[in-house]
Image (cartoon, rainbow, N blue to C red):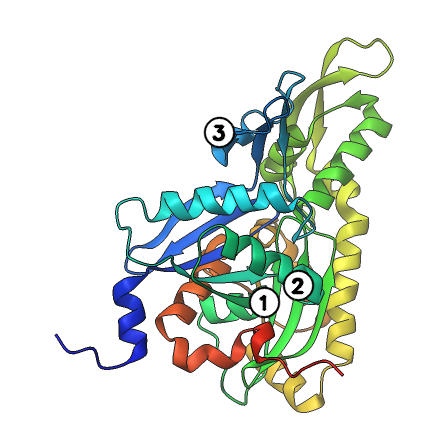
């Protein structure tokens, strides 16, 4: 078989892998197979030996339940690497698991999604951690761009598209046209912040201390930003701050709405701010085509309606919003020539510093 070009040769000797490196969950796409992994971004480390005990789902089950010498940590905070070595271990584990049945001669070619607006140092940390984990080639793409590609928006055409990607650690609001981000804003208000809001509210209103996992479950069960016709409620168990004993209380959707209202208002205001600085021609496109929301936050009941009501622009929830970034990295890998310009330049390609 004749190898027509370099691209075909690379595919023969190495796998193509796309990674959505998220604060809450990391998804992995393998060319030819689709999304093969969706694991929590949690690593359990034995502090006595320095060894990694568990990664992903197994490690998440250990959160808040470990003995003194084992620590379950999230190596990514607000979408960027906070613990380099542990992130490297996690990426190594995910790359090995993704291609365990299909190892090739060279390390995989990897496209990694990162939040918009992160610094060069943070980008280098992602690149180095992925290289050290065994990748032969690393490409970086901003998450709102990957989201837009993943939900099949015409990002390369001279047409404005607006995407809001609400993840675990960060929310990205971006306006995209001609393969580039025209305007964007990165917020530290996302799933983890909403969980913290719920913990804080229940602590002050009910005098009960609950854990992060309980807050997450309650948010998913009855969290809503607009009043529902039928009031929702759920019971939660926690530690009574006065007696120190376990106690169970019932919370309603209006409690959760009040708890997260300030963060949601900031998100909506930020969307308005991005629209205010968007060029009028592109704004006309966005008004006609609507705003697309993706990520776990897109599933919060009533959020799309609230943003639409506030901006007077139709808002669409992306199909399968949780996997949009990962699907985008996969499409980039399959059409690398087409989408090469949307990637963040390698340091080797940057002009020398003066």
Query: How crowded is the residue under tag 1: few (<14 C-alpha within 10 Å), some, or many (20+)?
Result: many
- Residue 185 position by quadrant: bottom right
Distance from label 2 to label 3 (Cα)?
29 Å
Query: How crowded is the residue under tag 3: few (<14 C-alpha within 10 Å), some, or many (20+)?
Result: some
Q: Can residue 72 be seen here?
A: yes
- Residue 198 - label: none
Q: Which residue is identified by label 2?
A: 172
Q: Which residue is identified by label 1?
A: 144
Disc nearer the start of the sequence (1/3): 3
On the image, the x and y values in percent for residue 126 come to 59, 57
Distance from label 1 to label 2 (Cα)?
6 Å
On the image, the x and y values in percent for residue 288 come to 58, 82
- Residue 212 position by quadrant: top right
Question: In the image, is residue 284 above or below residue 76?
Answer: below
Q: Are marks 1 and 2 in contact (CB under 8 Å)?
A: yes
Disc nearer the start of the sequence (1/2): 1
Q: Which residue is identified by label 3?
A: 58
**Which residue is more in the foreground, 178 or 136?**
136
- Give the left or right position of residue 353, taking residue 29 as reference: right
On the image, the x and y values in percent for residue 277 come to 77, 81
Query: How crowded is the residue under tag 2: few (<14 C-alpha within 10 Å), some, or many (20+)?
Result: many
- Residue 119 position by quadrant: bottom right
**Which residue is more in the foreground, 262 or 103?**
103
On the image, the x and y values in percent for residue 305 come to 64, 60
Determine whether the residue tagged by mark 1 lies in a helix, strand or loop.
helix
């Amino acid at each position: 078989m004749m190898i027509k070009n370099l691209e075909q040769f690379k595919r023969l000797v190495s796998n193509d892998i796309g990674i959505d490196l998220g604060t809450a969950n990391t998804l992995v796409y393998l060319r030819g197979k689709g999304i093969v992994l969706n694991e929590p971004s949690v690593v359990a480390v034995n502090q006595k030996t320095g060894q990694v005990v568990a990664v992903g789902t197994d490690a998440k089950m250990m959160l808040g339940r470990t003995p003194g010498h084992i620590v379950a940590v999230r190596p990514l905070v607000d979408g960027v690497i906070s613990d380099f070595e542990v992130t490297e271990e996690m990426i190594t584990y995910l790359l090995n698991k993704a291609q365990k049945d299909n190892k090739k001669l060279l390390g995989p070619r990897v496209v990694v999604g990162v939040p918009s607006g992160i610094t060069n140092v943070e980008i280098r940390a992602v690149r180095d951690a992925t290289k050290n984990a065994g990748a032969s080639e690393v490409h970086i793409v901003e998450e709102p761009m990957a989201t837009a590609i993943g939900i099949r928006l015409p990002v390369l055409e001279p047409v404005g598209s607006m995407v809001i990607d609400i993840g675990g650690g960060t929310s990205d609001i971006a306006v995209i046209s001609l393969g580039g981000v025209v305007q964007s804003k990165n917020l530290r208000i996302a799933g983890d912040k909403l969980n913290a809001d719920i913990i804080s509210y229940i602590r002050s209103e009910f005098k009960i201390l609950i854990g992060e996992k309980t807050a997450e479950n309650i948010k998913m069960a009855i969290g809503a930003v607009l009043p529902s016709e039928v009031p929702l409620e759920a019971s939660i168990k926690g530690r009574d701050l006065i007696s120190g004993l376990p106690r169970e209380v019932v919370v309603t959707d209006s409690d959760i709405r009040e708890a997260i209202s300030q963060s949601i208002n900031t998100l909506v205001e930020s969307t308005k701010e991005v629209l205010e600085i968007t060029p009028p021609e592109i704004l006309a496109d966005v008004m006609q085509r609507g705003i697309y929301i993706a990520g776990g936050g897109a599933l919060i009941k009533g959020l799309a309606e609230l943003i639409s009501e506030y901006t007077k622009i139709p808002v669409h929830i992306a199909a399968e919003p949780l996997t949009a970034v990962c699907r985008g990295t996969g499409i980039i890998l399959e059409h690398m020539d087409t989408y090469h310009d949307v990637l963040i330049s390698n340091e080797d390609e940057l002009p020398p510093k003066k």
